[in-house]
Image: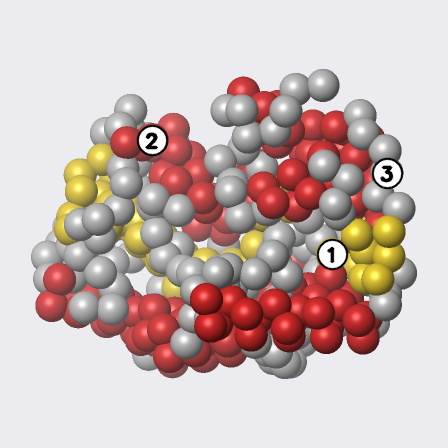
Amino acid sequence: MGKVVITGITGFVGGAMARAAAAAGHELVALVRPTSRREYLADLPIRWHSGDVTKPETLHGLLDGADGLIHAAGMLGQTGVPESRYFALHEQGTVNILAEAEKAGVSRILYVSSPGILGPISGPPAEETAPFAPTNSYERSKAAAEQAVQIFIRAGLPVIIVRPEFIYGPGDYHVLGLFQAVAKGRFFTIGGGQAHCHPTFIEDAVQGMMLAFTKGVVGEIYHIAGPTPVTFQELGRTIAAALNVPAPRYNIPHWLALAGAAGLEMVGKISGWRPPLSRSGVAFFTQNRHFSWQKAYHHLGYTPQYDLLQGVKTTIAWYRDRSLLENP
């Protein structure tokens, strides 16, 4: 494949995908907002196209002559962001970029979705066929976007869907606060810390998504996740061990955490301050989210290479190199 257009390239996942695509020999074109920072990708041979997926008039010509599209633009859950903004970016933005790809005749498209659209998982790790059960603005908008993608697929657009889960690693700032909280002895579990999450190291996530882009079956969905789910208690203890600090000791009852988060949100709404814990954050730490990656294994040959301790140690080294975590 020759020319590949990437949206969301200045984000953690999009940037990592760009590096993988460049290493594979693809010619890169990036869609970026005029205000987006690009300097950390300055070493890559990228042609920049100024635009925004929510503004279809800025997409004209973006995909002309393109062989592939990786649509990774998105916004993770944040306190105080109106739900309409998530839908504008995730659902309508996806419709806009896929409509442009349809007109340009792009032959291979990867849409980066989220397994969060399946909601909390009560049984074994969820497979790709599990029903949608989103619980927050981010998940609802991503579910709507994936439904829109299915309409394009039924119309003949060659889209493959990937759902990477809880990605962390060098280059990520979204979970930096978690590492800092453990380092300072401020991390606490909620409701016993026995809910499961499913961390996926960035190199594994990129490996899986690039396999889907090159080998995936059009119209199929693939979960890309780490080797195994872990409890939040295990996650905290693993990070603490890698940091060489005492394991987290404190636990807060679920009802108290929820009440405290609601109060913090109220203060944040009045003052413009971003609270350290929100009700959606409480949900994240108390709901099971674990997903089967066996379909990606059987269809694509995907096998995650980084166990949690290895991935956490690599991430900590990157943070310390940038003075984001104190050295021991």
Q: Secondary structure at mark 2?
A: helix
Query: Label 3 vs label 1: CA separation?
Result: 18 Å
Q: How is the image coloured?
A: secondary structure
Q: Quadrant of the N terminus?
A: top left
Q: Secondary structure at mark 3?
A: loop
Say if 304 sits above or below 91 in the image. Answer: above
Estimate how packed mark 2 is, as few (under 14), some (14 to 19) or many (20 or more) residues with alpha carbons within 10 Å: few
Three-letter amino acid code at the position of disc 3? Ala
Q: Residue at x 46, y 46 (%)?
A: 13
> Is 136 positioned to the left or the right of 124 in the image?
left
Three-letter amino acid code at the position of disc 1? Cys
Q: Residue at x 61, y 78 (%)?
A: 135
Residue placed under numbered mark 2 in the picture: 40
Q: Position of residue 122 (x, y in %)?
A: 81, 74
Question: Which is more N-terminal, label 3 or label 2?
Answer: 2
Say if 43 sits above or below 105 in the image. Answer: above
Q: Position of residue 260 (x, y in %)?
A: 71, 69
